[in-house]
């Protein structure tokens, strides 16, 4: 199938534990792991860039062949291609383990100030390190390409990417098992 192009963003469906986290932040999304689709290979597969426990890694979309994906597209093809170039530039960044601790402390602070309830995606502010989680990788690539999906100071959680979809910065082009 030739439905994806370089610069498309894929989100994998969350498991039960990840869904519990996602329900704390608005807007809700059932996606957890995000990756950037690179170029198409001769065998019909696609190169991907993702942030895993070992850092930013290239891979293949076929690694997610049985996963339920939602694929989004940025309307500006040129910015999408620039984002893929940025992904190769960020290829040596590590995984941001500290970010989850940072988000936990911010959530506690938010609840202390506002009472219990769902946290709006914009209330979680970005830390200043150079490591990235999967959503940070995708958003940073587009930020560097001049097409910010979320404001620079906001942690690009799955909810923030869903907000980019709701705001029309990206559009869903596929949902299902690829």
Image (cartoon, rainbow, N blue to C red):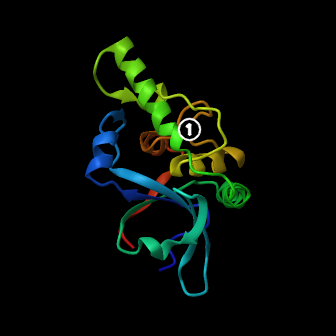
Residue in the foreground of this view, choosing between 62 and 147: 62
Quarter of the rendering containing residue 29? top left
12 sits left or right of 135 in the view: left
126 sits left or right of 63 in the view: right
Disc 1: which residue: 150
Quarter of the rendering containing residue 151? top right
**Where 26 sits versus 171, above or below?**
above
x 69%, y 54%: residue = 90
Quarter of the rendering containing residue 78? bottom right
Q: How many tags in the picture?
A: 1
x 56%, y 45%: residue = 96
**Where 173 sits versus 130, above or below?**
below
What secondary structure is found at the residue carrying circle 1?
A: loop
165 sits left or right of 147 in the view: left
Using a 10 Å C-alpha cutoff, classify the residue at mark 1 as few (fewer than 14 neighbours), some (14 to 19) or many (20 or more): many
In percent of width and height, residue 48 lies at 57, 67
x 60%, y 63%: residue = 57
**Where 5 sits versus 97, above or below?**
below
In percent of width and height, residue 45 lies at 53, 79
In percent of width and height, residue 14 lies at 33, 54
Residue in the foreground of this view, choosing between 103 and 85: 103
Q: Residue furthest top?
A: 113
Residue 146 seen anywhere in this rendered image of the structure: no
x 28%, y 42%: residue = 20
Residue 117 seen anywhere in this rendered image of the structure: yes
In percent of width and height, residue 43 lies at 56, 87
The C terminus lies in which quarter of the figure?
A: bottom left
């Amino acid at each position: 199938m030739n439905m994806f192009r370089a610069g498309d963003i894929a989100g994998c469906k969350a498991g039960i534990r990840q869904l519990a986290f996602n329900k704390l932040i608005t807007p809700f999304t059932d996606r957890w792991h995000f990756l950037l689709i690179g170029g198409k290979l001769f065998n019909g597969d696609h190169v991907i860039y993702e942030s895993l426990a070992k850092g930013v890694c290239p891979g293949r979309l076929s690694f997610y062949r049985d996963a339920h994906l939602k694929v989004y597209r940025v309307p500006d093809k040129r910015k999408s291609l620039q984002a893929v170039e940025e992904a190769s530039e960020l290829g040596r960044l590590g995984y941001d383990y500290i970010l989850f601790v940072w988000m936990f402390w911010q959530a506690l602070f938010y609840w202390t100030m506002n009472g219990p309830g769902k946290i709006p995606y914009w209330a979680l502010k970005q830390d200043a390190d150079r490591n990235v989680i999967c959503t940070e990788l995708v958003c940073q690539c587009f930020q560097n390409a001049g097409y910010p999906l979320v404001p620079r100071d906001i942690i690009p959680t799955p909810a923030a990417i869903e907000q980019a979809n709701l705001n029309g910065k990206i559009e869903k082009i596929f949902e299902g098992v690829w």
